[in-house]
Image (cartoon, rainbow, N blue to C red):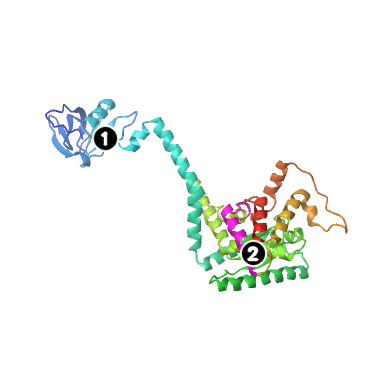
Amino acid sequence: MNEMNPASNAGLAVRYFDGRSSRAQEVRARLADGRLYLIGPEVNRVLEARQVQWPERTRRGPRIALLSDGGSIQSADTAAWDAWVRSGGRSESVVVRLQQSWRGVVASLVALVALTAAGYVWGLPWAAKVVADRIPEGIETQVGDAVLEQVEGFVKPSQLSAQEQQAIEQAWQQVLRAHTAAQAARGVTVRPSRLLIRDSEDIGPNALALPGGTMLLTDDMARLLQNDTKVIAGILAHELGHVQHRHGMRMLVQVGVLGFVTSALWGDYSGILAGVPLWLGQAHYSREAEREADAYSVMALRDAGVSPVVMVTLFERIQLFRRCGDALLKPAPSGSAPVCKQESREQAEEDDERGFWGLGFASHPADEDRITFFRDAAR
């Protein structure tokens, strides 16, 4: 610190207000030895400089320092004030220096954007996992029931025959029982789940895992797979992986946090909870979540003695559905194949965005990578 004493410091002419009257007094202000000296015809004061609220340096406007007793000193000569403060040994904070530099402002903006992006990509998913894993089972069940009530608004009872539904349920229960027993031997508890088969033109070929353990399978998914119960069981094992890892609850927490932050900024909370089905449908699980669910499906199928290669059929049928559309879901005359459309890559990607509403199988990672994963798992 550059220390100066009152005798050698000429000081700065300022206007002094004592805080009791509106009358300004012309005084000389000196900074030395960590103290502020105010000397004038009727004023002779010594104050600790650290107890003074010093103003930040700005490009415009007078400088006003607030004293601890309610008084103040002011100066319209900003350049002289800033030089005086520096000569008295007071340095500016890093924030103030950055504010005065366009390079500092740009650097701060870039850092803010980078920090926000990092928080969204890594921080928010981590926080959502921590929060979701600590939510009591009973609360998650209540949330799941509320979500299911909304989802039931755009699905109908299954149009599959009773025999078809029973075959799907039996195949799944066989896999689930074998997997539950194997997990128990490993010291792991399988979270409760239940299967609902529903018909919906809006959802199309799909399977969903809701918070609380409800797994929804659509008629169109069964039709797409030609009621191949082993493949359907593999899909349900994948959805059980989402249930086991509480991915649905994590996603609701994550998207809910974003919704509440947005609502706090814009002041509108009305659409947050009402949009839960939309969140589930359009906010695909992350790549990590899909890989976890894929790995869980492999484990469950192996526990039941079913080769994971059956899952390759799913992706082959999905790729065919992208070309053939709804024609693939209708019974074809004996000996004939469905009429498939030819479309551009851009159109295929657009259809992929509209179709497979909320189904992780149609999102990241790429189908080819997942086919390779299940084929390798079968070796």
Which of the pair 199/69 is nearer the observer? 199
Q: Say which element carries label 2.
A: helix
- Residue of label 1: 91
Which of the pair 238/185 is nearer the observer? 185
Instruction: Give the residue at x 71% y 55%.
Output: 315
Where residue 368 appears, as percent x and y from the top left, is 67, 51
The local crowd at label 1, few if under 14, some if 14 to 19, many if 20 or more residues have their Cα within 10 Å, is: few
Q: Say which element carries label 1.
A: loop
Instruction: Considering the whole magenta stretch, tell me its main secondary structure.
Output: helix
Q: Earlier in the sequence, mark 2 or mark 1?
A: 1
Whether residue 16 can be seen here? yes
- Quadrant holding the N terminus: top left
The vertical placement of 204 against 1, above or below, is below
Instruction: Give the residue at x 79% y 54%.
Output: 328
User: In which quarter of the view is residue 331 placed?
Assistant: bottom right
Amino acid type, label 1: Ser
Where residue 246 appears, as percent x and y from the top left, is 55, 62
The vertical placement of 131 against 7, above or below, is below
Where residue 217 appears, as percent x and y from the top left, is 69, 62
Asked if disc 2 and disc 1 are in contact, CB closer than 8 Å, the reply is no
**Which mark, by number, is residue 311?**
none
Give yes or no for residue 287 being in the magenta stretch: yes
The vertical placement of 305 against 367, above or below, is below
Question: Label 2 to label 1, Cα distance in Å?
Answer: 64 Å
Instruction: Give the residue at x 63% y 66%.
Output: 300
**Which mark, by number, is residue 237?**
2
Residues shaded magenta: 281-303
User: In which quarter of the view is residue 219 placed?
Assistant: bottom right
